[in-house]
Image: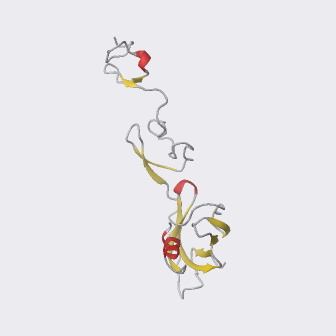
Amino acid sequence: MPAPGHILLLDTGGQVVFAASHGLRPLQRGSFQGDIPTIAQARAGQGRAQGRTQIRYRDGILGRELHAQTAPMDGYLVAVLVTDSAPWRAFTPPTKDTGPQAREYICEHCDEEFRSFEPACSVCGVPRCPECDRWACPARVTERLCQGCFIRHPPAMFADGADRCLDCS
């Protein structure tokens, strides 16, 4: 390849069967790329598409914008993605290097909006919130909010029918 980029072989479901990368972070076999714009357009049509798109890395992190062209091949989809010097175009200026883009999340517990490059939890699929240090997994123990200290405690910390914990009573 004349420029940094990827050559991908995708199955009909949009999963990477084979990937060769040059000058960019490699893609893992089995990663899903079927919904990124140019590949989604190719899958929805005759298998041929071209344009600009971004590859999805781990946990939905998007890479830099790339010039892309796809073509069908014996039940597969071949995609060539490059930063510049795309052979199928007369002139292709370098794409803007936006770098990786983290996904955005809203914490289930403190409503904090955050972006994260951290690996997602295998149970809830969300990384740990940097503000409250919790995942989106449901609590294993029922908690109650004390009206005195405004701290969440397990039920054993409350007398029957009380709205304040034993420490505040």
Q: Nearer the viewer, residue 138 or 150?
A: 138
Task: Tell me what residue is drawn at x 57 percent, y 78 percent.
Answer: 70
What colouring does the structure picture have?
secondary structure
Task: Tell me what residue is drawn at x 43 percent, y 26 percent.
Answer: 142
Task: Tell me what residue is drawn at x 52 percent, y 47 percent.
Answer: 125
**Residue 28, percent from left and from top:** 65, 60
Q: Tell me the quarter of the image containing the C terminus.
A: top left
Give the quarter of the image for residue 18.
bottom right
Give the quarter of the image for residue 25.
bottom right
**Residue 53, percent from left and from top:** 50, 71
Q: Nearer the viewer, residue 148 or 154?
A: 154
Q: Is residue 74 above or below residue 143?
A: below
Viewed as shown, does residue 74 lie left or right of 117? Answer: right
Q: Is residue 160 above or below residue 120?
A: above
**Residue 147, percent from left and from top:** 31, 21
Q: Tell me the quarter of the image containing the N terminus.
A: bottom right
Q: Is residue 152 above or below residue 1?
A: above
Q: Nearer the viewer, residue 24 or 35?
A: 35
Viewed as shown, does residue 2 lie left or right of 96? Answer: right
For this orientation, the residue located farthest to the bottom is: 90
Task: Tell me what residue is drawn at x 63 percent, y 63 percent.
Answer: 27
Give the quarter of the image for residue 2.
bottom right
**Residue 157, percent from left and from top:** 42, 16
Viewed as shown, does residue 165 lie left or right of 44? Answer: left
